[in-house]
Amino acid sequence: MALDEFDSENRIFTAVGTSPVRPDGMDKVTGKAQFGADMSAPGMLIGAVVRSPHAHARIVKIDASKAEALPGVKAVVTRADFNNSVSRANADVLDNCMAGDKALYDGHAVAAIAATSATLARKAARLVEVEYEVLPHVTDVDAAMVPDAPVIREGIDAAVEGMSPNVMARHEFGHGDIDAGFAEADLVMEKSFKTAAAHQGYIEPHACLGSLGADGRGELWCCTQGHFVARNICAELLGIDAAQLRVVASEIGGGFGGKTTVFIEPVALALSRKTQRPVKIVMSRSEVFRATGPTSSTSMDVKIGMKRDGTITAALAVNRFQGGAYPGSPVDMGSMCSFACYALENVKAVGYDVICNRPKQAAYRAPGSPMAAFAVESVIDMMCQELDLDPVEVRIKNGAREGTKASYGPKWPQIGLQATLEAAKAHPHMKAPLGPNQGRGVACGFWFNHGGETSVSLALSPDGTANLSVGTPDIGGSRASMCLMAAEELGIPYDKVRTTVVDTASLGYNDVSHGSRVTYASGLATIKAARDAKKKLCQRAAKIWGIDEDAVTWEDGMAIPAGHNAGQHDPLPFAKICKSMGRTGGPISGHFEATPEGAGVSFATHIVDAEVDPETGATSVTRYTVCQDAGKAIHPAYVEGQFQGGAAQGIGWALNEEYIYGEDGRLQNDGFLDYRIPVASDLPMIDTEIVEVPNPGHPYGVRGVGETSIVPPLAAIANAVSRAAGVRMTELPMSPPRILKALDDQDG
Amino acid sequence: MSKIHVSTYINGDETEFLCDPEETLLDVLRDRLGLTGAKEGCGTGDCGACSVTVDGRVVCACLMLGAEAAGRKIGTIEGMADGADLHPLQRKFLDHAALQCGVCTPGILVAAKNLLERNPDPTETEVRYWLAGNLCRCTGYDKIVRAVMDAAAEMRQA
C-alpha cells in the first residue's frame, strides 16, 4: 500500500487522539517565547515607513533632505532601492511593499527611514516631504466595476467587455442547464448580498529584523506563516541569491492567512543593505489595518430554484469581490465554494475579480468561502421559511455525498458533510427552546484543504529520542501534532520527540502554513519520514543479527525477525538500535521531500441561537455549536480550538467587523477601538462536535481543520438574526444600525 | 534631550533605568530591560497584550510612561511562576489548551491572576467581563474561561 493512502482502518492509536501539553507551552505561559518584535541585535537601527495619506495619487517627488539632516537618521529608501526587474509573479508584491509611480491606497508605503531609535525614526518619517498629484479614487466593489469608474491601473485592456478595466478577470464554474432547472422549480428565489472587508486581526503586528551585508549575504528574523516563501520573495525583491538569505521564523502571534506574504521584510533588508547595520521594523496597529490584510469586500447575487419538497433544481451565483489595488481576490475560490455543499444537476457560479483603492487583500481563513456561503445559505434558509421546510432536512436531502459531482468539477470521494448534518440534527442544541426575540440559524460550509510542497527531517539520537525538523511555522499548536504523529509511528513516548520549526538554511523548501495543510501535509511527511527511519532501523537490526534486510520487520516500536526462516532473535527496541547506531553504520535520519496530493476536503454544519434587541438593534449570540469533519483529530483539544476560533472570528465578521472608508478614500477605523473584534464578554461557550470521516489521502485520515470553521458562521448567524428579528439581513456586518434600519424599512 | 533616571521594583527586584520622557513603561520593559513577555498589540490600550500590574492594579503598560514607574511595584508575566513551579493559572492554561498562538497569553494570565486575587470564586460572566480588555483572536475564549475557572477552583482548595 502506498504510504500516502489511508491505512488506519481498525487501527488502535496510542499517541494520536490524545491532547498532551504542547511542547512550546511552557515558554508561552512564562513570557519566554520570542515573537517577531522580541528579537534585537547589536548595533540595530529601527525602521519606520512613510505611507500615503491618499487613496490614489501620483507620486511627483519625494524629498527626504529634512529627515536625513536629523542626527541619528542613517538611511532613506524608496522604490529605486529595490530590484525593479522582478518576475511578473512578484511585481505586485514589490509594488505593495513600496509604491512605484503611484500610491494606490491610503497607507501604501512610499519610503522608509532607518534611525538610531524608534522615536527618531518616527519623527524622521514625518519630515519626509512627498509631493502627490491626487487622483480620483474608488473603494466600493460595485462602483469600481462600472465603465466610467476611476481606473486604478492604466494601459490595461478591459478583461470583460462593457465593464471597467478594474475588472481583472472573470471565472465560471458549473454544469447542467440552469434555465431548464429553474423552469422545473416550484419556487425560484433571487437575492443580492454584500459583505464588508474584515481584517484577520492577529494580535501580533508584523515585525522583522533584517541584516544584509555588502557581500549579498543576509539574515532575516520575522513573524511569518512561511519563511521559505518570505526568503524567496525577499531575495528576488533585493536581487540577491535565495541561498544567501537565511530566514528564521519567530513564534507567530496569529496569522489566519494574513502573514503568508511580505510587507516590511524587504524594506528592512533594503535599509540594512544601505546602512550595513541590522534594521528592525515593527508595524503599528494602524499600519496593520491600513496596509496589510484584509479580506475582500463583496457583492453577490444568488438565485435558487426549489421544488415544494425541498429538492433544489438549479442554482446560480454571481460573485463580485474586490481584492484591493492588485488582482487576485479569492473570487475564484469563493465561486468554487458557493455550491460545493450540494449535489446539483444544474449549477453555475460566476466570479469577477475587481481592483479598487484599498490595500491588497491577503488570504483570510478559507479565502472567499465564508462570503459565498453567506449568500447561498441565506437564500436556502429563506426558501425553507417560505416553503415551511426544516433547514437541516433540506440540507440532508440536497447535500453532497460520496460520488456527487461537485459544482466545480471533481467527483467526491468519501466526504463528511452528511455526517456533520446528522451530528447537528442529533445535537440537543437543535431541540432547545428559544426565548423571546431569539432565532436559530443553521448553515453548512466547505473548504478544499491543501497539500503543498513539504520537507521534513527526523534525526534519531543515541539515547532513543528523536528530533523532528519541520519548515511550516506553528500557527496553532502543530508542533504538538507533529510530535504525536512521530511518536505514534516510532512507538516511543510523545515527550521523546522534539519538533522544531527550523530556518531556511536547515531544511528543504516548504510552502507556507496555509490551506489547513500543516497537520495534513507536514503530518504525512512526518509519518513518512518516521517510516523511512524505521526502514533504516530494520537494516541495522539485520546487520546486528547477520540476516537479510527483508527478514526484519517493525512492530510495536521494535525490530523483530519477519518469520520463522529469519531465525530466533530477541526483538531490538528502538532505543537499543539508536544506542548502537554509531557502531552499526552511523547516524540515522528519516526524510520526506515531496508534494502530498491527497488533501481531503472538509465540511461543517453550525447551529447558532441569536437574540436581537428590537430597540437597539444589538445582537447577542446565546448559543453556538460547531459540527465539523476533521478526518482524524490528532490532538483533539487543538482541533476544538480551531473550531471555536473560526466560529468566534465568524461572529465578529457577521456582527461587527468592517472596514469603513470615508468619502476621501481613507480608512476611518484603523484601530481595535473602532474595528471591534469579539471580546470575552461578547461570546458564549462554543460547543464542538468532532466528526471523523477519514481522508483516504492521509495515512491516519487527517483532513485539516483550520479553515472550514469560519465558513458557516456568517450565514448561520445571519439566518439566526433574520429569524429572530423577523426581517432578512442581506448585508454584513449586521451591526445595530443596519438591523434597526432593516426593521424600520420593514415597518415603513 | 536628557533622560530620566527611574528607580522602581519589578517582580520584587529593585531596578533602575534611564528613559526618555515620552517612553512608555512597555518600551522600557521591552527595549531597555529585556522583559519582552508583555507584548505591544496596539499601543492604544485596546488589546491588553501588554497587561502588567502596578501596585496591584492591572494596567496597559503601553498607556503609562516609564517615568511613572518610579517607586511603584511592577508585576509582569516573567514574575508569575515561582522558579520551576508554574502558577496554577499557567498550568491550567496548558492543560486546557487555552492558548493557540500565545501572543495574548502573558497579558491574559496577568489580568486573570489579578482577578483571582480580588475574587477567588468568580462566575463565568465575571471572568468574561474581567478579561474583556484582553483580546484573543485564536481561541474564541472558551478554553481560556474554562482554564481560569478551573484554576480558581483549584486555588480555593489549596
Image (cartoon, grey):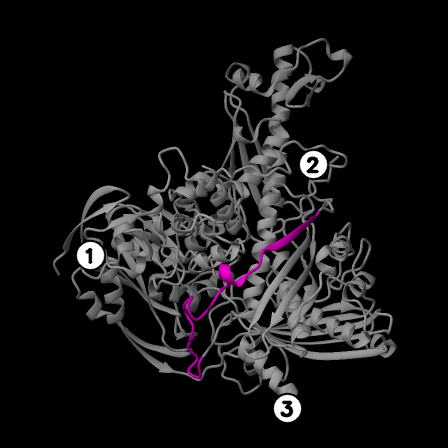
Mark 2 residue crowding within 10 angstroms, few (<14) / some (14–19) / many (20+): some
Query: Residue A677: within the magenta?
Result: yes
Front position in the image: B97 or A515: B97
B52 vs A103: above or below: above
Q: Quadrant of residue A284?
A: bottom left
- Label 3 in the same subunit as label 2: yes
Q: Quadrant of residue A433?
A: bottom right
Q: What amino acid is found at the position of numbered circle 2 in the picture? A: Leu
Residue A224 position, x and y percent, is 46, 52
What distance separates the C-alpha of mark 2 from that of mark 1?
62 Å
The magenta stretch is: A662-691
Q: Earlier in the sequence, mark 3 or mark 2?
A: 2
Q: Identify the residue position indicated by label 3 in the image.
A: A748
User: Disc 2 or disc 1, which is closer to the eye?
Assistant: 1
> Seen in the image, is A612 located left or right of residue A237?
right
Q: Identify the residue position indicated by label 2 in the image.
A: A3
Query: Residue A689: within the magenta?
Result: yes
